[in-house]
Amino acid sequence: MIEQLTVKSRGKKSIMKRLAKGTIVFKDRVFDPNKAFFQPLSNAQHPVALMFTCCDSRVEPAIITQSPPGTLFMVKNPGNLVPRYQAGANTSEAAAIEFALTVLDVHHIIVCGHTDCAALKALYNLDGLSRESAIYQWLAPHSEVLDTLEENQDSDEGLNELIRRNIIQQLQNLMTYPEVARRLEKGTLHLYGWKYRLETGETMLIDPFSCKPEPLSAVIAHLEEEARPDMTLGQMEKQVP
Ligand SMILES: [Zn+2]
């Protein structure tokens, strides 16, 4: 399925043609042979998790987690940020949290950062941005995480630490939402910090206390059992002729 979308030419017209062709390939080779799976999704969704991740084009949660459509309720923004709760705030993040919890009754929230994050590079060098730029205005309210970094690190180490600490900070920001706090207290909601490594394809669990990353493969046995989606993307692809 994905091979069909490989961009072999950088010409603008051919890129759009390729993307358009991809939609046809998807309908003919993925959707139509799996109608029994897709059609119930046309009027209802029951996602198992809300995920905050970066709008970076290399971070594709459905592929990283091998999950079919309908599994992840997703918010993508620069830097996978969650603004702190503010009564009456009209952010898309607050609306998504409210909808995911009170309408979809999601029991898991994942904040998934990633390596080589351009948004966090910009946050790391915030003073270099124009105060008028939209990215400065988006990042600046989240700059307090910079104060938690150790001093005298080289820039690569500093950025990696910022990526980890930023994930923890967003988990803490999530806890400022009264509905999140209430469900955490009741034990009906669980928060997780993940970091996707672009260079290896590995996803790490970020421990909120030690801030140390551990491969998800090493801790998977300790994750609680949950009802799995009926079909994984990998299983679905195997059915594609
Ligand atoms: Zn990013």
Image (cartoon, rainbow, N blue to C red):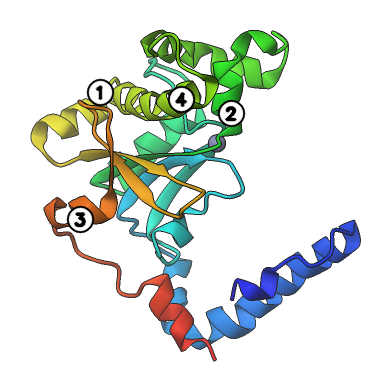
Residue 23 in sight in this render: no
Label 2 crowd bin: few (<14), some (14–19), many (20+), radius 10 Å? many
Q: Secondary structure at mark 1?
A: helix
Q: Residue furthest bottom?
A: 241
What is the count of numbered marks?
Answer: 4
Q: Earlier in the sequence, mark 2 or mark 3?
A: 2
Query: Quick check: 97 above or below 221?
Result: above
The one nearer the camera, 91 or 223, is 223
**Mark nearer the viewer, 3 or 1:** 3
Circles 3 and 1, Cβ within 8 Å, touching? The answer is no
Circles 3 and 4, Cβ within 8 Å, touching? The answer is no
**Mark nearer the viewer, 3 or 4:** 4
Q: Quadrant of residue 132?
A: top right
Q: Which residue is mark 2?
A: 119
Q: Which residue is mark 1?
A: 178
Q: CA distance from mark 3 to mark 1?
A: 29 Å
Q: At x 52% / y 31%, what residue is drawn?
A: 79
Q: Amino acid at mark 4?
A: Glu
**Mark nearer the viewer, 2 or 4:** 4
Circles 2 and 3, Cβ within 8 Å, touching? The answer is no
Q: Which residue is mark 3?
A: 220
Residue 168 in sight in this render: yes
Q: CA distance from mark 2 to mark 1?
A: 28 Å
